[in-house]
Image (cartoon, helix red, strand yellow):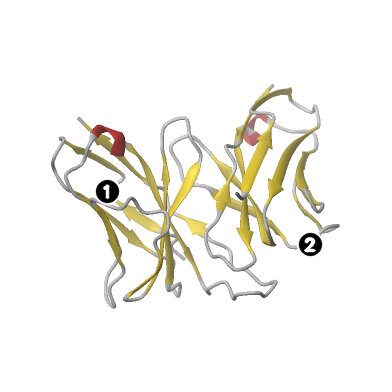
Amino acid sequence: EDQVTQSPEALRLQEGESSSLNCSYTVSGLRGLFWYRQDPGKGPEFLFTLYSAGEEKEKERLKATLTKKESFLHITAPKPEDSATYLCAVQMEYGNKLVFGAGTILRVKS
Amino acid sequence: NAGVMQNPRHLVRRRGQEARLRCSPMKGHSHVYWYRQLPEEGLKFMVYLQKENIIDESGMPKERFSAEFPKEGPSILRIQQVVRGDSAAYFCASSLRAPSGGSHFTDTQYFGPGTRLTVL
């Protein structure tokens, strides 16, 4: 069965303390891996799509990387406004739906 | 450049009533997806529609749930005879193009703000 596992479940950081979120997946064939950010009471906001192992994408303090079995979301010098739930999702080669992980709740304290 | 719109944002129903959730995709998008987020659980796929067609309903409960995306107007997710277990946030997403089988191209799904359904 296709699975997406995110770790840690929750992460507390001090402002400026860099860290990484992990998303591991077991799927029969990956078309794309997505990262979204979700604030309380809102819908997921698109961040990145990664297609192949070795690919990297950056946006402000965020950098996403992909290997054959997992993806990392690196947060460099986070700020309190980076506090949110970060969701990872995969789309299979012959599918159209996204399969989501449970998310990582990030809290950044000033 | 409006994003995906959903209404109502909050919906309260008593057990046994019907709930209708509406989704207007982003301008130019003709592919709509519905997801459900139960309390303390992740987002789960329900159904994928194109105009006037249901493409994949593998995540839809077999009974009481239906979805449509007519030629004109928003996509509708309908839940008949709601029960307390239907209380959840329902999200709609839209994409510009459809994923192509076997290709390495995928199209981003953009999400709406969600409808929070509470069943009393």
Residue at (56% x, 51% y) in the render: A99
| Residue type of the residue flagged with mark 1 | Pro
Quick check: marks 2 and 1 in contact, CB under 8 Å? Answer: no
Is residue B77 among what the camera can see?
A: no
Disc ID at residue A40: none
Residue at (20% x, 41% y) in the render: B82
> Measured from the top left, where is residue A38 in percent x and y?
54, 41
SS at badge 2: loop
Quadrant for residue B108, please give it: bottom right
- What chain letter is assigned to the residue under label 2? A
**Circle 1 sits on which residue?**
B8
- What chain letter is assigned to the residue under label 1? B
> Measured from the top left, where is residue B64 in percent x and y?
23, 51
> Measured from the top left, where is residue A1 in percent x and y?
60, 49
Outermost residue on the right side: it is: A54
**Circle 2 sits on which residue?**
A52
Vertical placement of residue B53 versus A1, above or below: below
